[in-house]
Image: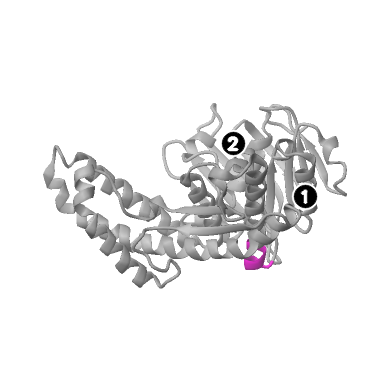
């Protein structure tokens, strides 16, 4: 799997850009604030994984009314042309080989990317929301139906939250509460089902990487944590829905009194232990960074196992945040697929054989 070329118009600080990429390593070099990360963001966007913003309008250049992205992609021995048109006042338009796509999730059926940025080094120490975002981003690319379920669950959660918040002034709003609760149960069961199976794959893959990374000294363990009434998160969706509904009904009065949603997978987390202790609390900076690296490299392996080929790996200025030992480990692990690496000085990557180096200045290749 690789992206052969990229064309941008009115995207971030790129007025117009056209670039052809190497099938192995592509080094994007330049000073800070010149557009290196924006280039990687464009590649990630075409895989359905927008990681820096929730709103398309923020991706459009300041002096443009619309933006355009086109990527020529090779996947499973076939060629695809994926395009995205972005507008300020209306919804995006996505196509693959000229066929209209309904959602960002469908882009993941063509192009998969794994992004590793400096913020990910704090994945273990961050709050549960960051770990949810990590697994959600992974699953959305692998399973387009999950993206639909997650979006619907979030929509229902926002509506129910507004009902509870405003019910003090308008008690009649509570007449619709059970309807939204049932919708959250229906889609929440799908969300839990997918998350549980993905975390299971992470648990099968990441500990081995972490053990190798730590020189055999540290054992990593992952545990998916969801609603307490769910006895087996990997159970069939129907069974999960029944358990979620029971939990939500038992907390109905408390939700009305507190005017907030107390039950549902919007509070899920992934517990990360190192040598039997909670990494978030007891792990050193080196241990938590090693664990975060292991999760991201495991994500890449899971994609390869699922799709039969490596996803495109995007390393956004992450090497500068690592000590030499961890840099070497990462670079030794990225062979076999297409890789994009951003950095300020390309001489630090002289050990990478072959590939292509791009220099970026003020939103242009020079």
The location of residue 282, given as percent across then percent down, is: 57, 44
Question: Which quadrant of the structure image shows residue 187?
Answer: bottom left
Where residue 341 sits in the image (x, y, percent)?
74, 43
In this rendered view, identify the residue nearer to me: 221 or 192.
221
Identify the residue shown where x is 50% and y is 32%. Answer: 65
Q: Secondary structure at mark 2?
A: strand
Tell me: residue 326, above or below residue 276. above
Residue 1 in view in this figure: no
Q: Residue at x 31, y 66 (%)?
A: 243
Question: Residues in magenta?
Answer: 302-308
User: Pointer 1: what residue?
Assistant: 329
- Mark 1: give few (<14), some (14-19) or many (20+) Cα within 10 Å: few
> Does the magenta run of residues contain 71?
no
Position of the C terminus, as image quadrant, is top right
**At which x and y percent is residue 179?**
22, 57
The residue depicted at 65 percent of the width and 37 percent of the height is 37
Which residue bears the numbered disc 2?
11
Pointer 2 local density, CA inside 10 Å: few below 14, some 14–19, many at least 20: many
Judge from the rendering whether residue 276 lies leftward or rightward of residue 164; answer left or right.
Answer: right
Magenta stretch prevailing secondary structure:
helix
Q: Residue at x 14, y 37 (%)?
A: 169
Q: Nearer the viewer, residue 227 or 317?
A: 227
């Amino acid at each position: 799997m690789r992206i052969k070329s990229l064309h941008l118009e009115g995207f971030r600080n790129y007025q117009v850009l056209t670039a052809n990429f190497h099938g192995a390593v592509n080094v994007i070099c330049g000073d800070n604030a010149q557009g290196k990360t924006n280039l990687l963001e464009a590649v990630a966007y075409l895989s359905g994984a927008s990681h820096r913003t929730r709103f398309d309008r923020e991706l459009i250049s300041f002096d443009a009314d619309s933006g355009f992205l086109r990527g020529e992609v090779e996947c499973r021995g076939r060629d695809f042309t994926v395009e995205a048109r972005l507008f300020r006042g209306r919804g995006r338009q996505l196509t693959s080989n000229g066929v209209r796509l309904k959602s960002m999730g469908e882009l993941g059926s063509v192009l998969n990317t794994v992004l590793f940025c400096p913020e990910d080094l704090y994945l273990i120490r961050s709050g549960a929301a960051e770990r949810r975002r990590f697994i959600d981003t992974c699953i959305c690319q692998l399973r387009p139906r999950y993206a639909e379920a997650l979006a619907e669950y979030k929509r229902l959660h926002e509506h129910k939250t507004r009902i509870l918040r405003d019910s003090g002034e308008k008690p009649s709003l509570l007449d619709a509460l059970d309807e939204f609760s049932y919708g959250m149960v229906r889609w929440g069961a799908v969300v839990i089902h997918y998350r549980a199976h993905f975390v299971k794959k992470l648990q099968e893959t990441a500990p081995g990487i972490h053990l190798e990374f730590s020189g055999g000294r540290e054992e990593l363990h992952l545990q998916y944590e969801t609603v307490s009434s769910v006895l087996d998160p990997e159970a069939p969706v129907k069974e999960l829905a029944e358990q979620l509904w029971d939990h939500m009904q038992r907390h109905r009065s408390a939700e009305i009194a507190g005017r907030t949603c107390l039950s549902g997978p919007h509070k899920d987390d992934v517990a990360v232990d190192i040598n039997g202790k909670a990494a978030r609390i007891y792990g050193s900076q080196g241990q938590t960074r090693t664990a975060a690296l292991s999760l991201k490299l495991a994500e890449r392996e899971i994609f390869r196992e699922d799709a039969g080929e490596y996803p495109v790996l995007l390393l956004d200025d992450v090497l500068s945040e690592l000590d030499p030992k961890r840099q070497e480990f990462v670079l030794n692990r990225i062979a076999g697929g297409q890789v994009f690496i951003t950095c300020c000085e390309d001489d630090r990557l002289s050990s990478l054989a072959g590939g292509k180096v791009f220099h970026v200045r003020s939103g242009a290749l020079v």
